[in-house]
Amino acid sequence: MKAGFDKAVEHLSGYNPREITEHSQPGVPPLVTFLELVNVGDLIQQMIDVFYEQELVAAKLTDPRDFLNPAAKEKKRFEQMLDERVAAGLNMGIDVIHPRPTNLTLCVY
């Protein structure tokens, strides 16, 4: 997951809307791909959460209130990593989109 998000952020950072001459696709393609990756990451996080609740907590193999439990720690670590990568990508996406309305405004006049 981490490598995929890092590559997506790298693609976003290299995107320059001024270099694109043909606008056959609506939106910013690297940003659309990043948002699809966010959806996949969210789905995986939900699957991990369901597994944790149904297989570990329900079977009383782990206590969800025990913050020192290795399973709970890894679950939190994954969630934190996902949150950090999504935040970095959204920040980069804002940086990529920001100059675009200025270009559109200049083209209208």
Image: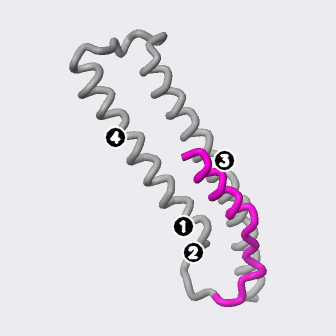
Q: Which residue is mark 2?
A: 27
Gap in Å between the C-alphas at discs 4 and 2?
Answer: 30 Å
- Residue type highlighted by circle 3: Ala
Q: Residue at x 57, y 74 (%)?
A: 27
Gap in Å between the C-alphas at discs 2 and 1?
Answer: 7 Å
Earlier residue among tags 3 and 1: 1
Name the spot of residue 51 as percent of width and height, x first.
Answer: 30, 32
Q: Decide whether residue 17 is among the magenta residues.
A: yes
SS under mark 3: helix
**Front tag of 3 and 4:** 4
Residue 60 or residue 43, whichever sits in front: 60
On the image, which quarter does residue 104 sit in? bottom right
- In the rendered view, tell whether residue 66 sits above or below residue 103: above
Snapshot colouring = one colour
Name the spot of residue 108 as percent of width and height, x first.
Answer: 71, 88
Q: Decide whether residue 88 is among the magenta residues.
A: no
Earlier residue among tags 1 and 4: 1
Q: Are marks 3 and 4 in contact (CB under 8 Å)?
A: no
SS under mark 4: helix
Q: Which residue is mark 4?
A: 47
- Residue type highlighted by circle 1: Val
Earlier residue among tags 3 and 4: 4
Q: Which mark is residue 88?
A: 3
Q: Which residue is mark 1?
A: 32
Gap in Å between the C-alphas at discs 3 and 1?
Answer: 15 Å
Mark 3 packing: few (<14 Cα in 10 Å), some, or many (20+)? some
On the image, which quarter does residue 66 sit in? top left
